[in-house]
Image (tube, rainbow, N blue to C red):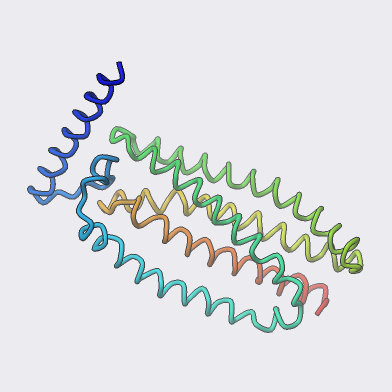
Amino acid sequence: MNAKILIRNKSIFSTHDTEYRKKLDLGHEPAVLTAAEDLYEPVEKSVAKRLPWLIILLGLGLVVSSVVGIFENVVASLPIIIVFQSLVLDMAGNVGTQSLAVTIRVLMDETVSRRQKLQLIIKETRVGFLNGLILGSLSFLFIGLYLMLLKGQAPLFSFAVSFCTGVALLTAMFLSSLSGTIIPLLFKKCHIDPAVASGPLITTVNDLFAVVTYYGMAWLLLIGVLGLA
């Protein structure tokens, strides 16, 4: 039984390898590589496909760092908010990765229609919004209690910071689920392998969303409205 399965799997991989090599010989680069095609792709070709995107994203990473620098005065006035920055960035990245994984799996089916792709975008953004609403509410409650009970902060300050974090978390998770779905779809449309280019780009874009949302909320609410600085 096991021998039959191994022979069958070997046959499948051999078939995929032959088809992939034919596509390369004809100059047709598949938009989404299969597992067999990933295994047989030469190392040099994989590096050539990935490195340009990493160089571009290095530049975008510098943009994100520059955006953080814009909010330097906010951090100097309210240093405690930097404690929860990683919470917002990490959750935004997690949501984007989940949406990306689902979208890549859907794109493996070449028969997916435009309507189904639109339904996928709507569904993933709804999932991101609802998850963000739940986690944002929990963050509002627990961060507020943490600052008030364990750090000795005033109730107004504690729950203002937690509200800022919760809203930023909700917004970042919603936008991350949207980008995690749309970006691979756009790459597939442009005949660019979304598995190679989407992940790093989504991570960088989500970091930008999260940083702007979090520090922007802190600047508007905590400093601009409540004057807590």
Residue with the most extreme left position: 26
Residue with the most extreme top position: 1
Residue occupying image coordinates x 50% and y 42%: 122
Above or below: residue 187 compared with residue 12 = below
List x then y, in percent, for residue 119: 46, 37
Residue occupying image coordinates x 43% and y 72%: 60
Is 17 on the left or on the right of 84, as rendered? Answer: left
Q: Quadrant of residue 172?
A: bottom right
The quadrant of the image that shows the C terminus is bottom right
Q: Which of the pair 121/21 is nearer the observer?
A: 21
Is 33 on the left or on the right of 67, as rendered? Answer: left
Residue occupying image coordinates x 71% and y 74%: 219
List x then y, in percent, for residue 5: 28, 22
Above or below: residue 8 compared with residue 158 = above
List x then y, in percent, for residue 225: 79, 73
Is 223 on the left or on the right of 177, as rendered? Answer: right
Above or below: residue 189 compared with residue 219 = above
Q: Quadrant of residue 157?
A: bottom right
List x then y, in percent, for residue 25: 8, 48
The quadrant of the image that shows the N terminus is top left
Tally the marks.
Answer: 0
Is 53 on the left or on the right of 143, as rendered? Answer: left
Q: Which of the pair 109/13 is nearer the observer?
A: 13
Residue occupying image coordinates x 39% and y 39%: 105
